[in-house]
Amino acid sequence: MRSWKDTLTFGDDYGYLNARLGGEWGYFYPYSFFYGMADKNLEELEQIFLSSPYSSHYRKELATSETSVLERIKRSMAAGSAEKFRKMKNWSPEEGKILMPIISIRADIYNGRALIRKYHSDRAPVTAPKWHDYGFLGGDFFDEIWREGNHVAEAIELCYRLGSPAAFALSEALDVLQSSGNLAMAERNYLKGLLSICYGSLKRKNDNYALVEDYLGRTVDLWNLLIWFRRNSGDSAFPVEYLDGGAFFPVNRLEESKTIKSLLRHTPWMEASISEEDRHSEVGRILQDKFFRWQISQRRKSFMGIGVAMAYMARQIVEWRNMELLAVGLAAELSPERIRTLLWKI
C-alpha cells in the first residue's frame, strides 16, 4: 500500500514537491540581510555561516581544507545550492524528473562557457571555477576535464569518452573553437546543442511543458539580445548568427530593428530600462534581472505545476550570487555603498 507521500508524488502531481519548496522558501535571506551585512566584515559573515542553512558545507570546508574564509564561503555556497537542487529533483513527480534537468540548463551553460574560455585564453586561471553541480553534466565531469585536458584536443576526447548528448554538444563547441579560434561561435554552438537536447524532451502538450518551452525561448532571447547589442554598438561585423527559437524575437525582427525601443516594443522585455549607450555588461545584468523576476513570479502563477520549482531555482541562484558578491566585497574591503551597488535587488 502506498503512503500519502507516495500518492502526492505519483504521476504528474507536483503537490508534494511544491509543499516542500514552500517550506524551504522561508530560509532565503532577504535583500535587507545583504544590505545590512555590507557594513560588516568577513569574519562576521563567517559567524553567520556557521549557523546558516549552509553550515554543514561550511564546517566540512573548515575540517578538510586550508582555504581562506572567502574560498570557504564560495565553496559552501556552491555545494549547498547544488544540494538543494538535487533534493528538488528527488522530490519531483515523474513529469518533473523530465522537466527539471531542462530548467537546470543554466548550470551546463555556465560550466561549459567557463571551460571553453579556458582553452581560448592564454591566461587561463589555475584553479577551477566553482562548478554548478546540478545540470545534465555534473561538476565532477567538468572538474576532470579541467584537470586532465591540458589541450583542447584532450578535452574533446574526454567529452567523447563520457558519451552523453550534452558532452557531445560540448565537444562540438570545443572543435569549433579549435578550428576557428572564435569564442562567440563556440559558445553559440554549445548553447544550440544544449537547446536541441532540451527541445527533444518536450514531447507532451500541457501547461508545464509550455512554461518550460517559454523558459527556453527566453533563454534564446537573452543570447540574441546581447548579440544584437554587439552588432548595433559599433561591431556590425560581429561574426555570430542569431539563434532560432526565441520567445519574442524572430530572427527577421532582430535583423530589421535599428533601435532598442523598436526591438523591445510590445514584448515583456520592453520594461527593461536599456539604452543603446549601455555597456554590454550592464545590458546583460539588466536582462538577467528581468529574466530572474519573470521566473520568480511563476511561484504565484503555477501553484500546482513546475513554476514553483522554476521560481525556487531562480531565487536560490540570486541568493548564491548575492552571498558571493557580499563575501568578495568584504574581502576586498570595498565600501558598503559599493557593495550595495553590486547586489541583485530581487
Image (spheres, rainbow, N blue to C red):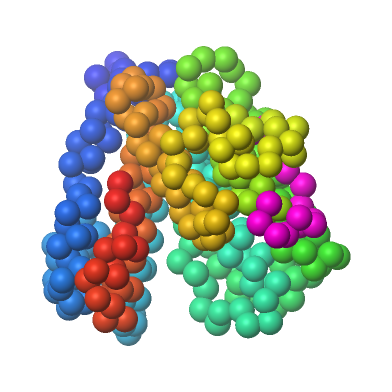
Q: Is residue 179 magenta?
A: no
- Left or right: 16, with 155 as reference point: left
| The magenta segment | 232-246
Residue positioned 15% across, 73% down in the render: 40
Main secondary structure of the magenta stretch = loop
Residue 307, given in percent of the width and then of the height, sits at 39, 28
Q: Where is residue 288 in the image (x, y as percent from the top left)?
A: 46, 47
Residue 180: x and y in percent read 84, 64
Q: Relative to the observer, which residue lies in front, 180 or 145?
A: 180
- Residue at left offset 55%, top offset 82%: 126
Using residue 99 as the reference point, say whether residue 27 is left or right of it: left
Is 8 displayed left or right of 287 in the figure? Answer: left
Q: Nearer the viewer, residue 272 or 163?
A: 272
Using the image, determine if residue 43 lies above or below residue 136.
below
Query: Which quadrant would residue 261 be assigned to in this image?
Result: top right
Is 17 in front, or is 191?
A: 191
What residue is rendered at 64% in x and 68% in y? 117
Q: Is residue 74 positioned above or below 229 on the image? A: below
Residue 136 seen by the camera: yes
Question: Which quadrant of the structure image shows residue 52?
Answer: bottom left
User: Which residue is at the front of the view, 154 or 40?
Assistant: 40
Quarter of the N terminus within the rendering? top left
From where the camera sits, is residue 221 visible?
no
Q: Within the magenta stretch, is there residue 235?
A: yes
Q: Residue furthest right?
A: 179
